[in-house]
C-alpha cells in the first residue's frame, strides 16, 4: 500500500451485502481494540489514555458474502473545548449515518452516568436503526454480574442483540462479526477486497507517531498536540521517505517532546518507524520535527485533516 493509492470501485459477487457499522461508547470502552480485532490489523490508535481516537477511522471486514465497514467514532463524553465538541459531533454523526450501531460498554464499569447519557442520545438521534449491545472486558467480572448488567441495559434500551465479548482476547468477537454480516444491506461491496482501511497512508502514519508520543509522554503532555505528515516521497528502491511535523501549543511542550538531548523524539521516531514498516511491509525513512503552533486548536485546517468538522466545535 502506498500513500498515493486511491479507493477503486468494488462489486463483489451475486448475493453480496455491504454496509456501515458505527462503534460508539465512552472513552476507553475498547472501541479501537475491537475494530483492530475485527479487521485483523492495527488501523486505529490504541492507548490507555482517553480521547486518542479523533478521526472516524474505517476498517473493512469481509465475512462470507458481506463487507462490513466499521466506523470507529471518538468516545462520547462531556465536551469542554472546541476540539471536544467537534469529536462528539463526529461520533453522533457516524452513528446516524450507519446501517447498524454497536454500543460498547465496559463490564466492570457497568451502567455509568456516561452510558446513561449515551442511551438518551440513542433514543433521540438514532431512529429505526438496529442497535446491538457489546459488553466488553467480560473477564473482569463474575458471570452473574454480567447477566444482571445485561438485564439492566436491555431494560433501559431496546437492543436488538446483546454480546458478551473481550475485544483484547477475541472472546465473542466472531459471533458479533457474523451477526453484523447478516444485518448488512444487500448490495455491491464498497471497497476492494484487499483494502482494510480507507484512511490515506499519510494519516495512518501520523496516527502511529501520535500514539507513540502518547505512550511515551504519559501524563506529561496534555492533548494540545497533533501530528501531520508534511511530505511523502516514494523512492526508487521501494522505500518511502516520510516527513512529519509535531505541533504543540506551548514552548514548554516542545522541550518535553524533544526530551534531554533529543532522546524522547528519537525513541518515538524509532518506534513509529518500526510499526509503519511492519504495516506497509517495506522500509520507511521517518523524519520528525517539533514546532510550536499556539492556536492550532482553533484552525479549521487541522480539524479537516483529522476528519472532523471545525463548525461542529463552535
Image (cartoon, rainbow, N blue to C red):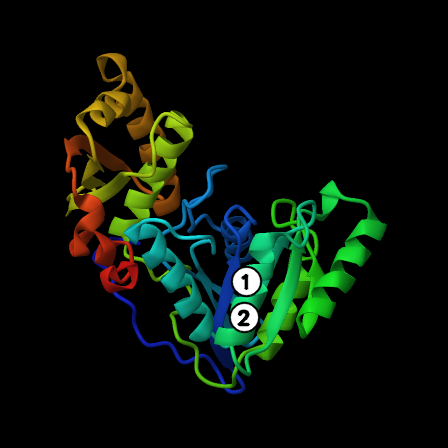
The reply, left or right, for residue 222 in relation to residue 61 is left
Quarter of the image for the C terminus: give it. Answer: bottom left
The reply, left or right, for residue 256 in relation to residue 38 is left
Instruction: Tell me the crowding category of disc 2: few under 14, some 14 to 19, or many 20 or more residues within 10 angstroms, Cα based.
Output: some
Q: Is residue 193 visible?
A: no
Q: In percent of the image, x 43 and y 66: which residue is there?
A: 92
Task: Indicate the secondary structure of the residue bearing disc 2.
Answer: helix
In the image, 9 versus 155, the foreground residue is 155
Q: Position of residue 118 (x, y in %)?
A: 54, 62
What is the count of numbered marks? 2
Q: Is residue 56 visible?
A: yes
Q: Position of residue 136 (x, y in %)?
A: 65, 52
Residue corresponding to mark 2: 122
Mark number displayed over residue 118 = 1
Q: Position of residue 28 (x, y in %)?
A: 53, 46
In the displayed structure, 73 sits above or below 218; it is below
Q: Residue furthest top?
A: 261
Amino acid at each position: 500500500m502506498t500513500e498515493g493509492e486511491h479507493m477503486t470501485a468494488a462489486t463483489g459477487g451475486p448475493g453480496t451485502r455491504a454496509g456501515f457499522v458505527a462503534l460508539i461508547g465512552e472513552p476507553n470502552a475498547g472501541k479501537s481494540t475491537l475494530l483492530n480485532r475485527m479487521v485483523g490489523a492495527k488501523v486505529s490508535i490504541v492507548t490507555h489514555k482517553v480521547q486518542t481516537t479523533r478521526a472516524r477511522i474505517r476498517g473493512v471486514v469481509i465475512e462470507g458474502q458481506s463487507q462490513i465497514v466499521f466506523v470507529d467514532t471518538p468516545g462520547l463524553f462531556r465536551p469542554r473545548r472546541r476540539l471536544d465538541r467537534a469529536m462528539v459531533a463526529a461520533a453522533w454523526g457516524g452513528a446516524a449515518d450507519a446501517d447498524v450501531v454497536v454500543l460498547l460498554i465496559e463490564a466492570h464499569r457497568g451502567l455509568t452516568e456516561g452510558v446513561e447519557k449515551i442511551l438518551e442520545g440513542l433514543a433521540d438521534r438514532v431512529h429505526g436503526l438496529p442497535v446491538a449491545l457489546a459488553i466488553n472486558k467480560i473477564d473482569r467480572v463474575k458471570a452473574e454480574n454480567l447477566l444482571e448488567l445485561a438485564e439492566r441495559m436491555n431494560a433501559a434500551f431496546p437492543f436488538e442483540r446483546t454480546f458478551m465479548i473481550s475485544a483484547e482476547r477475541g472472546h465473542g468477537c466472531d459471533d458479533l462479526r457474523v451477526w453484523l454480516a447478516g444485518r448488512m444491506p444487500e448490495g455491491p461491496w464498497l471497497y476492494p477486497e484487499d483494502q482494510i482501511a480507507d484512511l490515506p497512508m499519510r494519516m495512518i502514519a501520523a496516527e502511529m507517531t501520535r500514539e507513540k508520543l502518547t505512550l511515551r509522554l504519559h501524563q506529561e503532555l496534555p492533548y494540545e498536540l497533533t501530528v501531520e505528515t508534511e511530505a511523502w516521497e516514494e523512492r526508487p528502491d521501494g522505500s518511502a521517505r516520510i516527513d512529519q511535523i509535531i505541533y504543540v501549543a506551548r514552548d514548554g511542550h516542545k522541550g518535553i517532546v524533544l526530551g534531554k538531548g533529543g532522546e524522547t523524539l528519537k525513541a518515538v521516531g524509532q518506534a513509529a518507524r518500526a510499526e509503519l514498516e511492519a504495516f506497509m511491509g517495506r522500509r520507511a525513512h521517518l523524519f520528525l520535527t517539533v514546532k510550536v503552533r499556539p492556536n492550532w486548536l482553533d484552525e479549521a485546517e487541522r480539524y479537516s485533516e483529522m476528519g472532523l468538522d471545525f463548525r461542529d466545535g463552535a
